[in-house]
Image (cartoon, grey):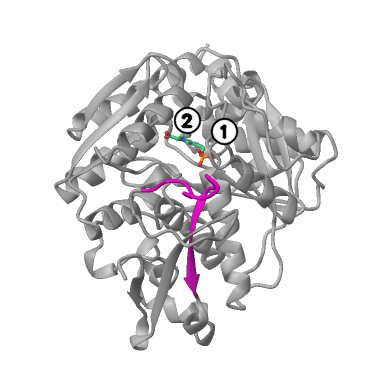
Amino acid sequence: MDNIARGRLSGGVRVESRVRCWECHREVEDPYLDACPSCDGLLEVSLDLEPVKEMAPSDLRTSPLGVWRYTPFLPVRPSMAVSLQEGGTPLYGCAPLASDLGVKALSVKYEGANPTGSFKDRGMTVGITRAKEIGADMVGCASTGNTSASLAAYAAKAGIGCLVLLPEGKVALGKLAQAIFYGAKVVSVEGNFDDALRTIREMAAQRLLYLLNSINPFRPEGQKTLLLEIMDQLDYRMPDRIVLPVGNAGNISAVHKALKELEEVGWIDSMPMLTGVQASGSRPLVESFRAGRRDFDPEPGPETVATAIRIGNPVSGRKALDAIYSTGGTAVAVSDEEILDAQLMLGRREGIGVEPASAASVAGLRRLLDEGVADRDEEVVCICTGNALKDPDTMMSQCVRPYSSRPEVAAVLEAIR
Ligand code: F0G
């Protein structure tokens, strides 16, 4: 059957996978569908992990750290992999930042170190490999920027045509430049990301292209490796909390799926509190979490300096809420000011350059600690999703914002004077 993918494991073991509706569990065979034909629910890949139960995490350590170390958890054929050697990103211990924020331990998973500078490359290597498996000759996405930069690069590597729809005037310069540079057809759409996504989904429904937004269930499969890698880097010591910026909500859902799969194979027996951070001007999930709801009302006019998460109608919003509720996590909104402060803190205290949306994770943690929602005794991992160079305009404007300079610099200047 076409929808059964097999991955070869070490020792010749194979995993099987099927695409199912996340809501009604119906199996879906048509690879061009991005929603359930019965109930319009979100799709997801279900893996038969029985063979992996015989393995231990150390069995995978013969391959380098990175997405393709985790082939037993990936529903595509590794022999067809289209890879730019994504993943294998640093997990920085951030003692100075932890002490500034007043938390026991803080690590930053720096996804800006991926080939195109964001975490999207993890999902895209798997998504494009799937596109090749099904023989697609044109791929496309709507994007706030990073997905398009990543898709453009992987489509180039695979020799597949690529169309990206971007919300007019709201994509950071570096991301726009990347998409054009890698040779994608770039079309600017009047409206916001949600409008662009609606348009490209219509094109995909007409089979004009294979859609590679995170609503495609193969994209989150690659993004699961973010969590798998963190566990490897921590030697399977579970952090208390993982904090992520949330836009379209694919990433937090993928991390949750990875946790459930690790639990299923018996490699973990607890979960971290998954914590989603949205910008105040774009926070439909925070609102619904506060109301204790499992569904949400889209926000018609999202607005934030963190353009990557300027999304009012997150397609995986229901999965994200499930991830938060079932791990005992929380959802929090932060202002643009808090985001920019956190971006500067990461740069000046830790030498870590992230784009504004990425800094939302640290800003969210700071707010939760200040409000007493997060405990100061926790060990926390913040996901920083994209590189500072993605958004040079914001970086430049940050350079003139005041930030308490280190005292020794002031002393040296005084001495020179
Ligand atoms: N951080 C960055 C830097 C992003 O680019 C995105 C999403 C997110 C966080 C949120 O992740 O959507 O999985 O909840 N960017 C998408 C894009 C929407 O088109 O590049 P999410």
Q: Which residue is mark 2?
A: 355
Residue 37 is situated, as x and y percent measured from the top left of the image, at 46, 49
Q: Position of residue 80 (x, y in %)?
A: 22, 64
Q: Main secondary structure of the magenta part?
A: loop
* Rendered location of residue 72, percent (x, y): 42, 73
Q: Report whether residue 334 is seen.
A: yes
Are circles 2 and 1 on residues that touch, CB within 8 Å?
yes
Q: Is 186 included in the stretch rendered in magenta?
A: no
Taking 110 as reference, is 30 left or right?
left
Q: Please state which of residues 411 and 5 is positioned toward the viewer in this rendering.
A: 5
C-alpha span from label 2 to label 1:
7 Å
Compared across the picture, whether 137 is left or right of 23 comes to left
Q: Which residues are magenta?
A: 33-48
Q: Name the quadrant containing residue 184.
A: top left
Disc ID at residue 359: 1
CB of mark 2 near ligand 1 (< 8 Å): yes
Residue 30 higher or lower than 68, as above or below: above
Q: Could you tell me the amino acid type at mark 2?
A: Glu
Quarter the N terminus occupies: bottom left
Q: Is residue 235 visible?
A: no
| Residue type at the position of mark 1 | Ala
290 lies above or below 415: below
Q: Is mark 1 within 8 Å of ligand 1?
A: no
Residue 44 sits inside the magenta stretch: yes
The residue closer to the viewer here, 315 or 150, is 315
Q: Residue furthest front?
A: 38
